[in-house]
Image (cartoon, rainbow, N blue to C red):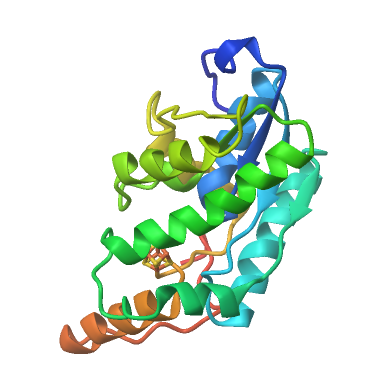
């Protein structure tokens, strides 16, 4: 395990709800929380992930790692019909655009509700650790979701700091996590495959690639 500086939750809170998008993104965060002695629960709510097989693989990788660390894991709904309904009219929006805002909003609204109903005063997400994502966009969505519940805060901690981005890759290789090759939704799968076809690259094969095995 990497040596990290000790983390402290905002307002000296004692426990955290961690919205997790996948094992590679949350793995390093989970270890940092463990070494900091922070009590937390992983909340997996990602109805954007398509197709079902990809969803199951990503979720099961996350469960495996949570079990390894004895961390409680909450399996949220796979509410994909609602996700597709909300995405109507945004099918051709680029990544980091308004469809992604909708997608983060949906995932954080449910995270904030779960936090409110289960006694967590603070929640955060692994989504921001990826350099592909716009951290300001993610933080705005998190803060908006939290604002619906008095007393609940979204922790905007920058997980890329302290070598987080690099450690995330190192840990993923060590754990041989499943390596997803697109952001998650049907439209990101379509767009990545279109780009690959144009650039003479192989189309994505779901369930094939694992870190540290190539
Ligand atoms: S590209 Fe990623 S963040 Fe954007 S809508 Fe699709 S799954 Fe959600």
Measured as percent of width and height from the top left, residue 135 is found at: 33, 41
Q: Position of residue 80 (x, y in %)?
A: 59, 76
Q: Nearer the viewer, residue 139 or 147?
A: 147
Residue 26 drawn above or below residue 78: above
Q: Is residue 112 visible?
A: yes
Q: Quadrant of residue 204?
A: bottom left
Residue at 55% over, 39% down: 148
Q: Position of residue 131 (x, y in %)?
A: 31, 46
For the residue pair 148 and 180, the one nearer the viewer reads as: 148
x 60%, y 28%: residue: 150
Q: Does the image show residue 21?
A: no
What residue is rendered at 67% in x and 63% in y?
59
**Which image quadrant shows ligand 1?**
bottom left
Whether 125 is drawn above or below 212: the answer is: above
Residue sitting nearer the eye, 5 or 78: 78
128 is higher (above) or lower (below) than 110: above
Total numbered labels: 0
Residue 199: give x, y in percent of width and height.
17, 83
Q: Image check: 65 left or right of 173?
A: right
Would you identify the image quadrant in which residue 114 lies? Answer: top right
Q: Residue furthest left?
A: 198
x 36%, y 61%: residue: 100
Nearer-the-camera pick, 154 or 7: 154
Q: Is residue 199 left or right of residue 146?
A: left
Q: In the picture, which quadrant includes the N terminus? A: top right
To which quarter of the image does residue 40 belong? Answer: top right
């Amino acid at each position: 395990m990497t040596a990290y500086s000790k983390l402290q939750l905002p307002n000296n809170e004692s426990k955290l709800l961690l919205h997790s998008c996948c094992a590679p993104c949350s793995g390093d965060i989970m270890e940092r929380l463990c070494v900091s002695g922070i009590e937390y629960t992983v909340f997996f709510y990602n109805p954007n992930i398509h197709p079902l097989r990809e969803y199951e693989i990503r979720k099961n990788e996350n469960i495996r790692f949570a079990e390894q660390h004895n961390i409680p894991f909450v399996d949220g709904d796979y509410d994909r019909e609602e996700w597709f309904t909300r995405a109507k009219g945004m099918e051709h929006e680029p990544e980091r655009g308004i469809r992604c805002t909708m997608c983060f909003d949906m995932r954080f609204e449910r995270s904030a509700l779960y936090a409110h109903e289960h006694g967590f005063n603070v929640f955060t997400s692994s989504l921001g650790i990826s350099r592909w994502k716009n951290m300001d966009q993610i933080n705005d969505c998190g803060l908006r979701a939290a604002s619906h519940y008095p007393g609940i805060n979204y922790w905007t901690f920058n997980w890329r700091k302290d070598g987080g981005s690099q450690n995330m890759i190192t840990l993923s290789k060590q754990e041989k996590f499943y390596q997803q090759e697109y952001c998650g939704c049907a439209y990101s799968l379509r767009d990545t495959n279109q780009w690959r076809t144009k650039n003479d690259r192989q189309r994505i094969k779901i369930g094939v690639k694992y870190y540290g095995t190539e």
